Image (cartoon, rainbow, N blue to C red):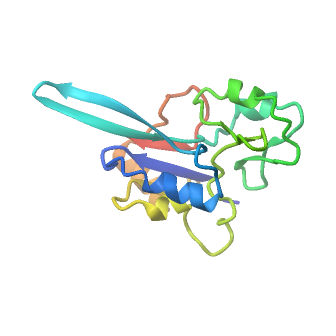
C-alpha cells in the first residue's frame, strides 16, 4: 500500500491560485470554501526583498490530532492512510478545527459540516497519478506520490532539496516544503 505525500516548492510558487481553483472545482466547494489557503512571507533585506507565497492545506498527519478528537469518527484514516471526513457522520462540532495545529479545516456554510483536503482521494486508483492541485499548477510547485517508494519522484525530490514539514516535528506530516 502506498503512503501518499506531497512536496510543495515555495520557491516556484507565483501565487496564481490555480491549485486552489482546481481544488474548489474538483470538490464542488462553495465560493467561500477553500481547502488551500495562502500565506505570504517577506524574506531578505532591503533592497533585495522577496515575497514568498506559501500554500497551506491539510498536512495528512500520520498522528492526526483532528482524528483523535472527533467524537463521531467522521474524521478518520481511510484505507490508504489519507485523513478523510465522512460528511454523513460530521455533526459540525468543530473539535477537529480546534485540534488542527495548521488551521486548515473549513466549514461548509450551507451544511455546517467540516471539510478539508483529501488529496482528491477520488483520483487515487482511478488511473490519475496526481491530485488536481498538482496538475493545475503552471510552475510545477507540487509533487504528489508514494513517500515509501525511494524511486518515486517525490522521494527523490525530498532528498535532493532537503524538503521538510513546514512545522518541523509538530506532527508526523506527509506534506514537505522546499523553502
Residue located at (31% from left, 50% from top): 12
Give whichever of 20, 134 is nearer the camera. 20
Count of labels in the image:
0
Residue 179 in view here: no
Q: Residue lying farthest bottom? A: 127
Percent of width and height locating residue 44: 20, 27
User: Which residue corresponds to the image point at 68% horizontal and 59% vertical from the top-left?
Assistant: 121
Q: Position of residue 169 (x, y in %)?
A: 55, 27
Q: Is residue 19 left or right of residue 10?
A: right
Q: Observer-nearest residue: 46 or 169?
A: 46
Choose top left, top right, bottom left or bottom right for residue 10.
top left
**With 48 as the anchor, is 19 left or right in this view?**
right
Residue 140: x and y in percent read: 37, 59
| Residue 172 visible in this rendered orientation of the protein | yes
* Residue 91, horizontal then vertical, whole percent: 86, 36
Q: Determine the residue positioned at 88% across, 43% down.
A: 89
Residue under the point 48% across and 59% down: 134
* Residue 52 vertical placement versus 169 (above, below): below
- Dividing the picture into quarters, in which one does residue 27 lie? bottom right
Q: Is residue 54 left or right of residue 29?
A: left
Q: Is residue 71 above or below residue 88?
A: above
In this view, which residue lies farthest toward the left?
47
Task: Give 106 or 99, whichever is nearer the viewer.
Answer: 106
Q: Nearer the viewer, residue 123 or 87?
A: 87
Q: Quadrant of the C terminus?
A: top left
For the N terminus, the image quarter is bottom right
Amino acid at each position: 500500500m502506498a503512503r501518499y505525500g506531497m512536496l510543495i516548492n515555495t520557491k516556484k510558487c507565483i501565487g496564481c491560485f490555480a491549485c486552489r481553483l482546481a481544488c474548489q472545482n474538483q470538490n464542488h466547494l462553495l465560493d467561500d470554501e477553500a481547502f488551500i489557503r495562502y500565506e505570504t512571507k517577506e524574506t531578505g533585506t532591503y533592497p533585495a526583498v522577496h515575497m514568498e507565497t506559501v500554500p497551506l492545506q491539510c498536512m495528512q498527519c500520520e498522528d492526526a490530532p483532528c482524528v483523535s478528537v472527533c467524537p463521531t469518527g467522521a474524521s478518520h484514516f481511510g484505507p490508504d492512510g489519507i485523513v478523510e471526513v465522512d460528511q454523513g457522520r460530521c455533526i459540525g462540532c468543530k473539535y477537529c478545527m480546534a485540534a488542527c495545529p495548521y488551521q486548515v479545516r473549513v466549514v461548509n456554510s450551507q451544511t455546517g459540516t467540516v471539510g478539508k483536503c483529501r488529496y482528491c482521494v477520488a483520483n487515487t486508483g482511478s488511473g490519475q497519478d496526481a491530485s488536481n492541485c498538482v496538475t493545475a499548477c503552471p510552475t510545477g510547485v507540487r509533487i504528489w506520490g508514494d513517500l515509501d517508494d525511494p524511486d518515486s519522484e517525490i522521494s527523490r525530490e525530498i532528498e535532493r532539496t532537503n524538503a521538510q514539514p513546514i512545522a518541523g516535528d509538530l506532527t508526523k506530516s506527509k506534506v514537505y516544503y522546499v523553502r
